[in-house]
Image (tube, rainbow, N blue to C red):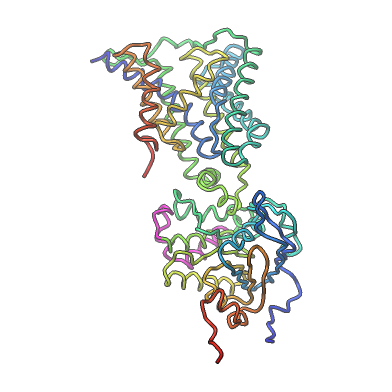
Amino acid sequence: MSSFMQTLVWGIFNGAIYGIAAMGLALVFGVLKILNIAHGELVMLGGYLGFWAFSALGLDPFLSLVLVIPGIFVLGLILDRVVYRWVVRQWGEEKIKNSLLVSFGLGLVLTNLAQWLFTGDERSVQPSYAGEGLNIYGVLMPYTRLATLGIVLVVTVALHFFLRKTYPGKAILATAEDYESAELAGININRVYMLTFALSAALAAIAGQFVTFTYALLPSIGMFWTLKAMIVIVLAGTGSIMGALPAGLLLGIIEALSGAYLAQTYKEVIGLVIFLLVLIVRPQGLFVRK
Amino acid sequence: MPTWGRLCMPDKFLQIRDVSVAYGDIQALWDVSLDVQEGEIVALIGPNGAGKTTLMRAIAGLNPLKSGTIHLAEKALHATPAYKIAAQGVILVPEGRRLFGGLTVFDNLELGAYSKRARAVRGDTLKLVYELFPLLTERRNQRANTMSGGQQQMLAVGRALMGVPKLLMLDEPSLGLGPLVVENIFETIKHMNDQGVTIFLVEQNAKKALELADRAYILEQGRIAGTGAAQELLHDDRVQQAYLGICPTPET
């Protein structure tokens, strides 16, 4: 029983990172209506910024979020202005094709840039309290993992509050629903797109910071995180921003259970099988209203 | 020829000159020129596909012009992004209402006042809109897409009013609505006009539009095919046949 509980808990911990990585992708997909293939590279860059803050400045990986979040947020503003603005205002098939090509290309550029700047060596962040944690009836819960889950929950609630209750947040939701109506209401949608993209980048950066002490940090991890986030937003229902966390937790739990009870090697495959099943049986996603 | 005080006002308010709009290779408007003067109600009538909606969208900045100019009180609106046109008080209630369906009634109204100019007086405007449509007060926390068509149209008009319009443009406000709601909407338009808001209206119900309007333009196949005082057009044989469904009494 306790081994089952332990597996479940690990699944939840991993799923929390999937959730926050996917939230940013869902936000851009829902508002800018593009699939940002380079989202995983933003996770990777967030990780390297966190690694640098830890190794050069000696900052605690949770404390350094105050540096990593605004840093990648600004990078998001720049990328939107320089790269994404040109494809967001295109139409139909052209927009879909160009956004995929442009973001895929940007992903390659960022990966190689990271390779050049940070080398291909595997990095990770180990805070002094890395091995410590709670032991509840034999179920281990490291402090780093508990704090990760806590931050993910806080960020999710904060994002929900921002989107539902503040004026710029409502402008984002309005633009997602009908960008022409938003313009008619006096909303500068270019600015909305820019803010949304930067928020998405900041969410990716938070995920990246968690990656530094849970997974290996390499310049090439971007595609892995883009794919994970894509599976999650399909589970959640494309465009469902708040569905990303429950869907991420679900994927984390499924992976952990299938890793423990089927075979570790099939862990990744199970995620993709679920992805296909959802697309076939419930293409609108599991966590959409109506 | 009746002398319409408003017709003789010298200052042009909305001034559209030689406007052409094309969707790719298909041209929808050909050298359209028209004027709307301050305080008027002007109707635009014409058959389906004549380009009425295209013209409205062009004025609001949603469709780029191929050529021509649009001015509001001497200020150029063409080549201005839509959100800036809205900020100047030119507000369109688009065809089919186009509400933010997943957001509440209150959110929709609040977003209508997004421009700096409208935001500054948001509290007061909101009170006025709630007075005008008491139903929206009751439903303020309801999601917009859970309301009936008529209620949604009220909300669409309410959202536009939140933008503090100088020129209020309505594209087919009566489309798909019951007669009572239509009556209500038209009364609101009249009321807003009495309050000094200039109205430019596209309406498939030509009779109703002409009864309400001071003047009207007829748009056919992307070109202005006629214009005149609304009362005169109401009694014009050609207009009666084409748009009012009245057959001329055969002469014997």
Image position of B75 (left or right of A98): right
Q: B172 or B60, which lies in front?
A: B172
**B30 above or below A56?**
below
Which residues, given as a range, are shown in magenta?
B122-148
Residue furthest to the front in view is B252
Image position of B62 (left or right of A166): right
Q: B166 or B217, which lies in front?
A: B217
**Residue B128 image point, x, y percent:** 52, 65
Residue furthest to the bottom in view is B252
**Residue A268 image point, x, y percent:** 40, 17
Residue A191 placement: quadrant:
top right
Residue at (40%, 11%) from the top-left corner? A132
Residue B215 placement: quadrant:
bottom right
Q: Is residue B124 magenta?
A: yes
| Dominant secondary structure (helix, strand or loop) of the stretch shown in magenta | helix
**Residue B209 image point, x, y percent:** 55, 73
Residue at (50%, 58%) from the top-left corner? B96
Residue furthest to the top in view is A121
Image position of A216 (left or right of A290): right
Residue furthest to the left in view is A1
Q: Quadrant of the N terminus of chain A?
A: top left
Q: Is residue B1 magenta?
A: no
Q: A239 or B207, which lies in front?
A: B207
Q: B91 or A162, which lies in front?
A: B91
Q: How many marks?
A: 0
